[in-house]
Image (cartoon, rainbow, N blue to C red):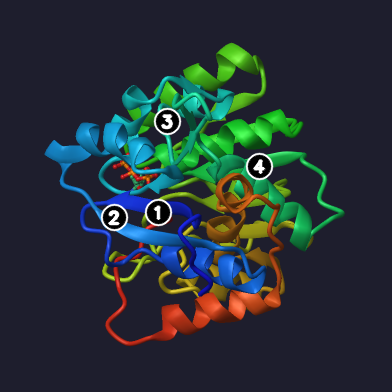
Amino acid sequence: MLLSGKARLAGVLGWPVAHSLSPRLHGHWFARYRIDGVYVPLPVRPEDLELAFRALPRLGFLGWNVTIPHKERAFALVDRRDAAAERTGVVNTVLVHPDGTLEGRNTDGAGFLAHLRAEYPDFVPATALVLGAGGAARAVAFALLEAGCAQLRLCNRTSARARALAADLARLFPDRVLVCDWPPPPAALSDLALLVNATSLGMTGQPPLLLDLAPLPAGAIVADLVYVPLATPLLTAARARGLRVLDGLGMLVHQAVPGFAWWGGRVPEVDEELRRCLLEALEAPARTGLSVH
Ligand code: ATR
């Protein structure tokens, strides 16, 4: 680490924050580009969040990421937000502008798309099915429609949440959103270009997502946002069927790029070396309950 008195400062706010992979991720980039900077875990209790948002710019921080349980409250604590944050109600990245104002961004949806395009440059956004209706599903659904997805199907255990998300999506993208029953019927899978699991099913400690993938067309891509474990039962089943897959680590990495570009001062590369560094951290024993930031 090359730290001087002028070191660039950034970090991740969470409670708890010990599980976060972000210090490893941003630390890798700082070291790799030999940048005079540091990215630290910031354990901040919910009752101290507002205080932290006021103090960090005055301490010289250029920005920070926000993780569980602060992402919704961070939305209210910034001075302005990008379109993705406005649509999702969630802020995962905060940039401190030179005048001290705070910009909140949600980079999850763009991160998902960047990963998808990097892995499958030939992907054509035709029909997609998103399972889930939480913050992650919301970010991915908006991003897919913005990317030109012709029809987006939504499916969630609590159908009222899927309908509420569909109504929000339809305001911007009319006639392209459809709500399906949970679990999705085979007919909802038979013409898909992309299936995305944005529920917590399949995560360590949660039940698996039990879905018969037989109706999916041969060229379909199966994506899972869960990355603990990296080989979820859904992805294992998709591989066994010979389908193309997208694992959850890619979105984690790609969503971090805009933040680092701001506080690191250069757009970082996403490559195999970085992936290896994170896999090593993921494979360390006693590492469970990781979150996206
Ligand atoms: P995030 O913001 O990370 O997306 P979330 O808002 O807690 O997290 O959303 C979790 C998603 O996983 C929801 O879609 C949830 O479904 P409900 O809206 O019905 O709660 C889904 N989920 C969690 N446990 C589930 C289970 N056992 N079966 C089906 N869906 C489940």
Check disc 2: other Cα within 10 Å, few if <14, some if 14-19, many if 20+.
many
Q: Residue at x 28, y 37 (%)?
A: 55
Query: Residue 128: which disc?
Result: 4
Q: Nearer the viewer, residue 36 or 205?
A: 36
Helix, strand, or loop for circle 3? helix
SS at badge 4? strand
Q: Report the amino acid beneath label 3.
A: Ala
In 3D space, how far apart are the residues under numbered discs 1 and 2 (Cα atoms)? Answer: 6 Å
Q: Are marks 2 and 4 in contact (CB under 8 Å)?
A: no
Confirm or deny contact between disc 2 and disc 3 (CB under 8 A): no
Residue 280 at x, y = what percent? Answer: 49, 84
Determine whether label 1 and label 2 are within 8 Å by CB: yes
Question: How far separated are the C-alphas under marks 3 and 4?
Answer: 15 Å
Residue 260 numbered mark, or none: none
Task: Give neighbour class at mark 3: few <14, some 14-19, many 20+ (Cα, 10 Å).
Answer: many
Q: Amino acid at mark 1?
A: Gly
Could you tell me which residue is drawn at 66 percent across and 37 percent down?
A: 144
Estimate how packed mark 4 is, as few (under 14), some (14 to 19) or many (20 or more) residues with alpha carbons within 10 Å: many
| Between discs 4 and 1, the one toward the N terminus | 1
Secondary structure under tag 2 reads strand
Q: Position of residue 32 (x, y in %)?
A: 64, 73
**Residues at circles 3 and 4 in contact by the CB criterion of under 8 Å:** no
Between the C-alphas of marks 2 and 4, the distance is: 37 Å
Q: Which mark is residue 162?
A: 3
- Name the mark nearer the viewer: 2 or 4: 2
The residue under label 1 is: 11
Is ligand 1 within 8 Å of the beta carbon of the residue shown at mark 3? yes
Judged left or right of residue 50, residue 142 is: right
- Residue 42 numbered mark, or none: 2
